[in-house]
Image (spheres, helix red, strand yellow):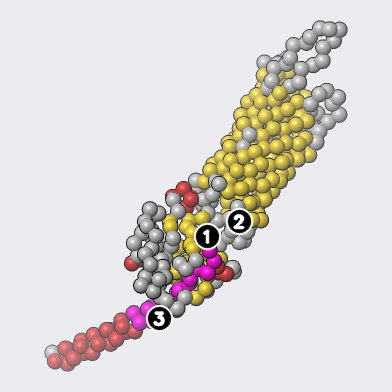
Amino acid sequence: MPRMRCSCISWSRWFLRGLAFACFGALVTSTARADDREVVVPETTVRSAPVDVAPEIARLHAGDRVRGDDQVQGPWRRVALPNGRYGFVRDADTQHSTIPVSSPANEPRADQSAPAPASSASGQAAPVLVQRQESSESQAGPHLLGVMFELLPVGTLATTSSAGSSASFDSVFAVGVAPFLDGALSPYFTLGLSPQVIFRVKGDGSTNESAKEIDLRARLTARAPLSSRVRAFGRVSPAYSIILIPSPPSTNGNTIASPANPQGFLVGVSVGVEVAVLPNLVVVTDVGYQTGFQSSSDGDLHTSYLHLGAGFAIGL
């Protein structure tokens, strides 16, 4: 019995020593991975990902101090916010701080309505981890307002008369314009509206006056960052489409009744990239395809187009 008791005591000592070394190693590792930073520019933006077009989640001001990673990710450095979230700031906007920063877990949640920090006895403002926390809407991502200019070099017009005869034609080179407004659902998804007008809707070789197509489109967009300034996206755009058929010219002074305007469901898909050229300005390019199922009492006129688009957007 005494020998067994000594053995148990010996094993207990070794276990406690091992546990102490493990805790010490974890503490050293955690400390080595943290770097206290101080903001050296008048204002810098904290984003949810290391890209310029990522959603803004907070802002820091000159003199603010945060705890960040000791390793950078390109031009970005990850920092910890008071509410426990992490964000990314431009590393050039910060420098190493010799004054230690308290752990964000021990800090109270930032309050936008809180008064400005009181000055210390030395006359300098007391350090803060973050000037203010953005609203949940900003955390979801920026809203975008912009316009796309589109070339539609390839398309098909399919007609079916009320008598049942049908024909299909290649379309002429058409052009379009589409303003858009995207509301952020999350950092990676937006839901928006984008009415589109297509000019020169007619068959190749036709001498008739061109029709116009108006597509009242909704759109759901999914985005993914490719680099610090570039995001790829995929989009699906269901729409209600109306084709405005021009009235035929009168003959011998007699007015000919205007034909009915075909209308119906349309769906489009596209992929593209967004490039941030300025902090609040994005250049957009895409390629896509759309097909419509328009009909009227006079017959059907279905349109299908391949499009190439370019445009720009600003963050709201």
Q: Secondary structure at mark 2?
A: loop
Q: Residue at x 47, y 52 (%)?
A: 139
Of discs 3 and 2, which sits in the foreground?
2
Identify the residue at horizontal 57%, vertical 69% (top origin): 92
Magenta highlight on residue 74: no
Relative horizontal placement of residue 187, taking residue 284 as reference (left or right): left
- Of labels 2 and 1, earlier in sequence is 1
Residue 45 is marked as 1
Foreground disc of the pair 3, 1: 1
Residue under label 2, please give it.
279
Q: What is the quadrant of residue 169 in the picture?
A: top right
Element type where label 1 sits in the image: strand
* Figure quadrant of the N terminus: bottom left
Q: Amino acid at mark 1?
A: Thr
Give the labeled residue for mark 3: 28
Query: Can I make out residue 3 in this image?
Result: yes
Q: CA distance from mark 3 to mark 1?
A: 30 Å
Left of 41 or right of it: where is 159?
right
Callout 3: SS = helix
**Residue 28 located within the stretch drawn in magenta:** yes
Could one spot residue 226 in this view of the protein?
Answer: no
Q: Which residue appears at 49% of the width and 66% of the height?
A: 62
Q: Foreground residue, 187 or 300? A: 187
Please name the amino acid that badge 3 sits on. Answer: Val
Using a 10 Å C-alpha cutoff, classify the residue at mark 2 as few (fewer than 14 neighbours), some (14 to 19) or many (20 or more): few
The magenta segment: 22-47
The reply to whether discs 2 and 1 touch (Cβ–Cβ < 8 Å) is: yes
